[in-house]
Amino acid sequence: MAYEAVLRVEKHPPVPMVCASASQAFEKGAIMILSDENLASGASSLGQNVGGILAYEKVANADATALAVYDSGTFDMYASGAINVGSPVVSAGVPANQVRAWTSGTHSGAQILGYAKGTATDQEQILVELAIGGA
């Protein structure tokens, strides 16, 4: 998968979540969004409410809906647009699994995936500290 997040520092084990459908497939390192309490799916548009980063691949039609999702940790990710060190980041949506700088007035706090630990230009790799919802 292009632009998957790569775990660099694990703070605690991934948390269990549920996928809405056994027919859905997601790659390890995908940004997951919350559609309901502990119900996750893949990010598909800019600034959705995030749940974390998928820890393991989820195979389609495997009669399984269990997911393991990191809600903390440090990840190598890819920037969509310029990001400054310390900036909050959100899911870019398209291209999938990239992050972009959070914009006050455009995004809500629930959409914050984490904070940039470096500076990046468009398509450049950047270190991101997960802080779901800006916590």
Image (cartoon, helix red, strand yellow):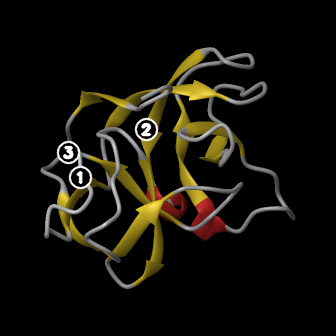
Looking at the image, is mark 2 or mark 3 earlier in the sequence? 3
* Residue 73 badge: none
Q: Residue at x 50, y 27 (%)?
A: 3
Q: Mark 1 to mark 3: distance in Å?
A: 6 Å
Tell me residue 13's x, y (percent).
12, 50
Q: Which residue is mark 3?
A: 56
First reached walking from the N terminus: tag 2 or tag 1:
1
Q: Which residue is mark 2?
A: 129
Q: Is residue 9 above or below residue 28?
A: above
On screen, residue 103 above or below 133: above
| Vertical side of 123 occupied by 98: above or below | below
Q: Is residue 59 left or right of residue 25?
A: left
Q: Secondary structure beneath disc 1?
A: loop
Neighbor class of circle 3 (other Cα within 10 Å; few <14, some 14-19, many 20+) is some
Residue drawn where x is 54% and y is 56% of the image: 43
Lateral position of residue 9 relative to residue 76, left or right: left
Q: Are marks 2 and 3 in contact (CB under 8 Å)?
A: no
Tell me the tag on residue 58: 1
Q: Is residue 99 left or right of residue 114?
A: right
